[in-house]
Image: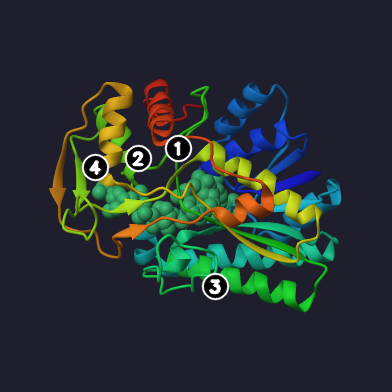
Amino acid sequence: MQILLTGGAGYIGSHTIIELDKAGHTVVVVDNLCNSKEEALRRVEKIIGKPVPFVRADVRDREAMDHIFKTYTIDAVIHFAGLKAVGESCEKPLEYYENNMNATFVLLDVMRRNGCKNIIFSSSATVYGDPAQIPITEECPKGHCTNPYGQTKSMLEEVLKDVQKADPEWNVVLLRYFNPIGAHKSGLIGENPNGIPNNLMPYITQTAIGIRKELGVFGNDYDTPDGTGVRDYIHVCDLAAGHVAALKAIEKKCGLAIYNLGTGHGYSVLDVVNAFERENGLKVPYSIKPRRPGDIATCYCNPAKAKAELGWQAQYEIGDMCRDSWNFQKNNPKGYEE
Ligand code: NAD
Ligand code: WQD
C-alpha cells in the first residue's frame, strides 16, 4: 500500500517508515517540522537505501493536503502529526486544541473528498486517565485526562468513532501507545526533544552524557513496589511494527478497531534507572523530588488483543530499550545536526 504519514519526520513516524518499507509498503511524509528536523528523514533514507518523498506542509493547510492526495494515490493515512508535550499543553491549551483538533478535521475532510477512508490514529494510554483496572484492556473505560494534550487525544478518538459510524466505508484504527522509548539500532535516528526533556528516558540519557546534572525522580511514595511510578515502556521499533500490523486490520476492512500497544510489563522509575546503568555500564545520578502534578502511580496494559487479532507482540526488552536509547544519545550528543 502507499501510506501517507502525517508527522512522519517525528520520533515515532521516522521509525515507522523503516518498518513500512521492510513490509513492502511505500510512503509519503507530510510534516511542518515544528517539532522535528528534515535530517531525520535523510537518515531514514540512509537506513532504507531509497528516497523518502517529503512534503513540508502543515496538515491544517487544506490546499497543500489536497495537493498531496491529487499527486499520490494514498491507500491509507497514519496520523502522527500533533503537539505532544503534556506540561506545555497546560500553558498553551488553545494552541494544543487548535493544532491537534483542526489538523485532524482538515485531514479527515480532505481524505473523504479524495476517496481515502483508511486511517490509523496515534492515540495514547493517557485516554484511560487514572485507569480503572490494571493491566489495562481496551474495554477499560476512558478516564479523566488531567491535561489539554490528553483531552485532544480522547476527543479525537470520539470524532473518529463518529465519522466511522456515520459512514461505514471508513476503516479507523485507534492505537493507544504506552511509553515509547529506545531508538533504531543503527544509532542514526532516535528521540530528539527540544529543550529540557519532559519524559523519563531522554532525561536519563541527557544526564548520562552530562547535559543534565541529575535526574529528578518524581515521588517515591506511590503505592508501587519501590514507591516510584510504574509504566509500560515499549521499544519504538516494536511500536512502529504495530502500525504495519494495524494496516492488516485495515486491509480486512475492520471498521472501527482499538488496540493497546505496550509490552504488558510495568517498570518503575528506579527499575529503568537500574536497567540503564546495568546495560550501559554507566551511573545516572538522581535524587528524589516531589510528585509531578497529574502523574498516576501505575499504568501498564494487557496487549493480548493486538496479539490475537493482529499477530503483533513486542519483541524487545527493557535492556534493549536502554541500550538503543543510549546508543542514539552517545552518537548524537547534540541531537540532529543539519
Ligand atoms: P513528535 O513530536 O516527534 O512527532 C510529531 C510530528 O508532527 C513532528 O514531526 C511535528 O513537526 C509534526 N506536526 C505537529 N503538528 C503538525 C501540523 N499541524 N502539521 C504538520 N506536522 C505537524 O512526536 P512522536 O513522539 O513521534 O509522536 C507521534 C504521535 O504519537 C503524536 O500524535 C503523539 O501525540 C502520539 N503519542 C506519542 C507518545 C510518546 O510518548 N512519544 C505517546 C502516545 C502518543
Ligand atoms: C514516566 C515516569 C514520571 C521524568 C507521558 C504522557 C503520556 C504519553 C507518554 C503521549 C513517571 C517519571 C519522568 C523525570 C521522573 N505521551 N519521571 N523524572 O508521564 O507516563 O507519559 O508520555 O501521549 O501522555 O503523559 O511518561 O516519561 O514523562 O514519565 O521521575 O524527569 O517517569 O513521574 O512516573 P508519562 P514520562
Q: CA distance from mark 3 to mark 2?
A: 28 Å
Is the N terminus in the top left, top right, bottom left or bottom right quadrant? top right
Give the vertical position of 285 relative to 147 (above or below).
above
Identity of the residue drawn at 36% across and 51% down? 231
What residue is disc 4 on? 270
Q: Residue tagged by mark 3? A: 155
Amino acid bearing label 1:
Glu
Q: Secondary structure at mark 3?
A: helix
Direction from residue 92 to residue 254 in the image, left or right? right
**Circle 2: residue type:** Met
Residue 44 x, y percent position in the rendering? 62, 29
Which of discs 4 and 1 lies nearer the camera? The answer is 4
What's under tag 4, amino acid-wise? Leu
Q: Which label sits on residue 201? A: 2
Please state which of the two labelled residues, at mark 2 or mark 4, is closer to the viewer: 4
Kindly report the distance in space between the C-alpha atoms of the residues bearing marks 4 and 1: 21 Å
Q: Which mark is residue 191?
A: 1
